[in-house]
Amino acid sequence: MPQVVRLQPPQDDALVRTRRRQIFLAACRVLARKPFHQATVKEIALEAGLAAGSIYVYLQGKDEIILLLAESMVAELTEALPTIRAGSLSDPRRELLGIMRAALDVIDRYREAFAVLNHEARYLGRRPQYRDVLKQILAPYLLALKDTLERGRAARLMRFDSMASMVEAVHMLCSGWAMGSGLLAKTDKESYWREIAALVEGRLFVPAAAKP
Amino acid sequence: MPQVVRLQPPQDDALVRTRRRQIFLAACRVLARKPFHQATVKEIALEAGLAAGSIYVYLQGKDEIILLLAESMVAELTEALPTIRAGSLSDPRRELLGIMRAALDVIDRYREAFAVLNHEARYLGRRPQYRDVLKQILAPYLLALKDTLERGRAARLMRFDSMASMVEAVHMLCSGWAMGSGLLAKTDKESYWREIAALVEGRLFVPAAAKP
Amino acid sequence: MPQVVRLQPPQDDALVRTRRRQIFLAACRVLARKPFHQATVKEIALEAGLAAGSIYVYLQGKDEIILLLAESMVAELTEALPTIRAGSLSDPRRELLGIMRAALDVIDRYREAFAVLNHEARYLGRRPQYRDVLKQILAPYLLALKDTLERGRAARLMRFDSMASMVEAVHMLCSGWAMGSGLLAKTDKESYWREIAALVEGRLFVPAAAKP
Amino acid sequence: MPQVVRLQPPQDDALVRTRRRQIFLAACRVLARKPFHQATVKEIALEAGLAAGSIYVYLQGKDEIILLLAESMVAELTEALPTIRAGSLSDPRRELLGIMRAALDVIDRYREAFAVLNHEARYLGRRPQYRDVLKQILAPYLLALKDTLERGRAARLMRFDSMASMVEAVHMLCSGWAMGSGLLAKTDKESYWREIAALVEGRLFVPAAAKP
DNA sequence: TATGAATGAGTTTTCATTCAT
DNA sequence: CATGAATGAAAACTCATTCAT
């Protein structure tokens, strides 16, 4: 599990996990109301049921809230992977759609916080000390995606040139949701999902008709 | 043209336009380096060749920089419309692709600033005093889009159920670029454009073959 | 006791009282040197032995310093009331003079700060959110005055038409001190007091000779 | 006429007087709405029908507005003196009451501005460069008062110990009006005047009955 | 661990004043 | 004389972070 390196890590036990979960959920609630830089550390701490200063026992600074968001969301996604794999009956196409749907669900669940994460990570990722940590956090999700795509190509069920741009495109499709559901109107998740699924099936999957 | 109401705006219109353009370009440069809330008003003013306080002669507060971004980008887009219409030979399909391409170009030109605009507008738009101004600023672009789509449907060249969701979807496709080109890797604009164009043609346009 | 409502006031009441007293005394010292709008919050904080930003733990903004002045002065006056009543032997005339003398003493003790309070309250009182708070703060003093005057009239020891204008007149006599002692010369408090006392006795009290 | 010493006085003619009068009246109107330090130079200039920077042709700085207030009010009072003297039939007692009534009228006419003048002059008067100018401006009024009082005493029509404290007391009575009419309620000018007149007659004038 | 008062660096914003036109 | 755009010093206020308890 991706764990941020700390000088004096708190006694890593259930308490830490509980507290970090509290903080994550509190941050999501607060960030649904106001942008990252208007949300104060104190506000998030209080929302999490902690005193203003106590957050620093579990986080080294405000920026780490961004990492915590990424970490927690990826964790939820990762937890769903075994079930998805089990339900895909070894068909990489089902598996891909399953992963994408799971990502969409997580993003939708923490819609506002995801938008914040997406925006802030852009800048955080430029600072060397965060760049690697971020990559590390995202790794489980990206690896799963890549693995599924690769198996799909190997089995001649999917077609595409570049793995990198493919992974990226899939991620963009998923996260486009969070963006679209912001500025303009209330998009319907299910109809958005149907669009995505159709797009993926049409352009990525090798047509079944081509196989006789 | 959307113009923010000011108590005592400077009189000289040409000067105001020049200065606001300077500030817009300066803001784009600064926002390419750091997020909105880390970019200080002073920094943007200096980048624009103005003294720290002088920005307040042309802007009522830091938030208005966001409005200025929207205003300036939409203005560039709007200026391109006549040419697009002229070149479309009255074919709404060509026109739609032209508008989308123009939007993509503007977004790509001010990539980082657009991402900031996109993110901050989400929060700005919640405050009533900004909501309407934002709508007003976006209106010329959205109206042109709507008009083109409507003519396309009337001429039985395009097909879709809801106008509103269509406008939204098109906008999402265009702006997805700015988001995607941020976090992960450097996407190639032309290949992204080909994806968009293919998607629009395939799902939105009435197939030519169906017409004989 | 009039207490300004705060979102998250510090919990420890004794500490709050101590700090607010420190700030009050510091403000008095600073306002003896310069007018309210030239006295910076930082200067008052430092004079109070606090860091620049710490004043905002106990005050919501600079304006509240005015409220703090009123609150503190009225509190000192109110504390003296029991002693005054005890020493007046149930004679409303003695009581009235006692209250007026106590007011004069408080005003003289914080002469400069009182002048500031008097001036600034004029403008603060126009803003609805402050108007009621100010009234609430002054209430204990005005009520005591009114009560004494009413008992004096009921006992046929004092004579006057309007209670409201009487309260006002008495207040003006007391606070005239702070104003008079400013611009022109150093007036002698005791001789000013003799004037006031003579005026009140002569025009307000029913002559003793009229009672046989 | 009291004139502030200036390095490069504007061509002293009717224009200067007109402009300074405009500025004075504008300042009175603005200061009726907000305190001195919230009233901007620009606002006063515009209210006077001048551009923001033009005020500096007639004033050396914002502080001089205070001097202008004093100068203008004293001038109005001084202009009334001949008429008062003419109507007093050489009776210093009538003359004193006339002067006081004239002062009360001026103060009432520019009530809010007078309160500002009264408050700010307290601090302005401490700075050496302003102290003497202020004295010079007030001189005509104070001298007239002193002269009348002295003639009253010489003619054995008035009685008092110290001339200085008498002048001061009279001034306090007059200006108490501006103060009293601020914080608490709307005092009636005429009833206030009757109080003053009675007070002066009772305690200052030699009783007519004592003369036979 | 947990607290929350204290800190002070950093930001936005205002506005008196200047000066080129 | 008149203008009003430009300036930049100064001030109020915020808040991430620390640390004694």
Image: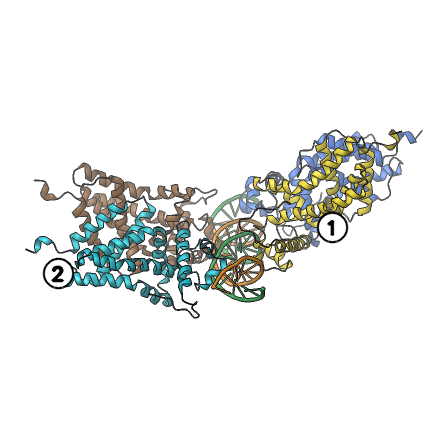
Chain colours: A cyan, B brown, C yellow, D blue, E orange, F green
Q: Mark on residue D144? A: none
State the image coordinates of residue B162 (x, y, percent, origin top left). 24, 39
Question: Does E7 sit above or below residue D86?
Answer: below
Mark 2: secondary structure: loop
Instruction: Please indicate, yes or no, whether residue C141 appears anywhere in the rendered image.
Output: yes
User: Which quadrant of the structure image shows residue A154?
Assistant: bottom left
State the image coordinates of residue A94 (x, y, percent, origin top left). 19, 55
Image quadrant containing the N terminus of chain C:
top right
Label 1 neighbourhood size at 10 Å, few (<14), some (14-19), many (20+)?
some
State the image coordinates of residue A19 (x, y, percent, origin top left). 42, 60
| Residue at numbered disc 2 | A156
Residue drawn at x 28%, y 55% is A103
B162 and B192: which is toward the camera: B162
Question: Does D73 sit above or below residue A138?
Answer: above
Image quadrant containing the C terminus of chain C:
top right
| Residue at numbered disc 1 | C109
| Residue D200 located left or right of residue A202 | right
What's the residue type where badge 1 is placed?
Arg
Residue drawn at x 87%, y 38% is D159
Q: Residue furthest left?
A: A212
Same-chain check, marks 2 and 1? no
Q: Residue furthest right?
A: D212
Number of callouts: 2
Residue drawn at x 31%, y 53% is A107
| Residue A52 located left or right of residue A22 | right
